[in-house]
Image: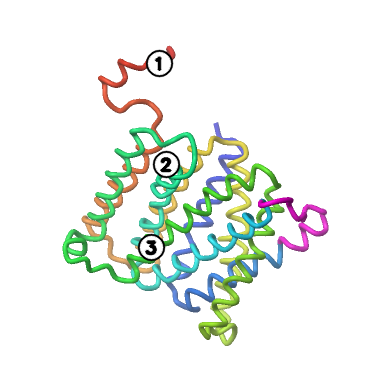
Amino acid sequence: MITKPRIALIIGIICISIFPILVKLNYTPGLISAFYRMAIALAIILPYAIFTKQLEIPKGSTFFLALLCGICFGSDVAVWNIAIQKSTATQASLLTNLSPVWVGIGTFLFLKPKPSRNFWIGTSIALMGMITLVGFRFFAQLSFDIGFSFGVLSGIFYAIYILMSKKVLSKISIVNFMTLSLISSSFFLGVISWLLGEPFNGFSNMGWFILLIQGLVCQLLAWTLISYSTQHMRATRVSLSLLAQAILAALLAWVFLNEVITIQMILGGIILLFGIRITFYDKPLFIGERNKVKLPPL
């Protein structure tokens, strides 16, 4: 049955999937593109939050965690942009989707309950998929270029963001959280861009149009819809569904950017996504383990 949360999730995934294509067009530098993505979204949601009186300063550590979430998410988008521009939209999208693996590792180290055996099996398979995707020779020679390194780093930043935002969202509203995190991410990326001498203007009309689409569609609309679906659906289902973003981005890159998708990349991507799928599977994988568990009748 097609429900409103599912429709919202589908539209949100589509909105995110077009982002790597827009970045790969290279109308603006990757870092400044991340800044404007946050700043444009903030310019819309901040007046709304103030007008509806949803903007509040949380008590205790929640406020600082919300700001830190913005810095992590801004860093995630910035390094992802650079990864896309230095490699391909396909590779960068697949590598950043390793974030569920890093989330599980972070959960094992800092949170409870600990990940199950399925998580570690899925993680091993996902890492094999990553090796297949990039090529065994890169790992044998330790020849990791900036595109690969930043693609993985993007997933790590996003994993940290997920772990922290889960705690913050249990205490404040979505609008308040998004506003605070966008304030911190915009300020952080703006300062970094200024220190590195990034251009804040001088773009073509198409460049400004792409920045506008990134801020309104890929950030504000996409993450509002995904947050709405998360409130009404199981988090695991939402997380699994978001993996479709990598596949859709690869197809769009093939159609609009003429990116070459090799058999090795397809095989590596399938193995990577299959491994991540296993990390979300609750029941025992093997028959012997299933017999030890008393499962409820179908």
225, above or below 288, in the image: below
Q: Position of residue 121 (x, y in %)?
A: 29, 38
Say which residue label 3 marks: 151
Q: Amino acid at mark 2?
A: Phe
Answer with left or right where residue 87 lies relative to residue 143. Answer: right
68, above or below 60, in the image: below
Q: Position of residue 263 (x, y in %)?
A: 21, 55
Residue 70 belongs to magenta span: no
State the residue at coordinates (65%, 42%).
170
Of mark 1 and mark 2, the one earlier in the sequence is: 2
Of mark 2 and mark 3, the one earlier in the sequence is: 2
State the residue at coordinates (59%, 42%).
229
Q: Amino acid at mark 1?
A: Leu
Answer with left or right where residue 63 lies relative to residue 26. Answer: right
Q: How are the colours assigned in the image? A: rainbow
**Helix, strand or loop at mark 2:** helix
Any mark on residue 108, and which? 2
Any mark on residue 264, and which? none
Say which residue label 1 marks: 295
* Mark-to-mark CA distance, 2 and 3: 23 Å
